Image (cartoon, grey):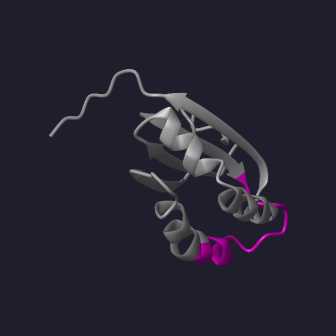
Amino acid sequence: MIRLTVMYNLPPGSDEEGFLDWRMGEHQDSNSSMPGVLRTDFARVDYRWPGQAQPPYRFMTIAEWPDRETFERGFYDPQVQLELEENLKKIDNPLFMISEILVETRNA
């Protein structure tokens, strides 16, 4: 499984509530309908451990694909990249990490 993790902030002076409305509505729908996506979620980072220090990023998005070929076909699709280019204008200092899940354990 391939996991895309994106950590990011909002530009200074942004309307966080307005961003959340867009991000949890229209943009979540867009992420979940990206070709091949199995799962996607969005989180607000409230603090980091240890010491509850201020985290370097405020938000995190995760999307997962079944394999690298499906990820590359979906994520690098020209239309997806055009939308990404536009969406990047809404965020600040993004960090994109692409990882391959080697072990997964789920507890019931």
Q: Which residues are magenta?
A: 9-22
Whether residue 39 appears in this view of the structure is yes
The x, y position of residue 104, in whole percent, is 31, 28
Q: Nearer the viewer, residue 65 or 17?
A: 65
Query: Along the horizontal axis of the image, is 82 left or right of 42?
Result: right
Nearest the eye: 80 or 108: 80
Question: Can residue 47 be seen at all in this image of the molecule?
Answer: no
Total marks drawn?
Answer: 0
Q: Is residue 56 magenta?
A: no
Figure check: 51 above or below 54: above
At which x and y percent is residue 89?
81, 63
Farthest residue toward the left? 108
Q: Is residue 17 magenta?
A: yes
* Residue 49 horizontal side relative to residue 88, left or right: left
Tell whether 77 sits left or right of 82.
Answer: left
Residue 16's place in the image compared with 40, above or below, is: below
- For the C terminus, the image quarter is top left
Q: Image height check: is 79 above or below 6?
A: below
Q: Closer to the camera, 26 or 16?
A: 26
| Residue sitting at x 67%, y 42% | 54
Question: Which corner quadrant holds the N terminus?
Answer: top left
Q: In x, y percent, where is residue 93?
A: 80, 47
Q: Position of residue 66 (x, y in %)?
A: 40, 39
Q: Quadrant of residue 106?
A: top left
**Residue shown at 74% from the left, 74% from the top:** 15
Residue found farthest to the top:
102
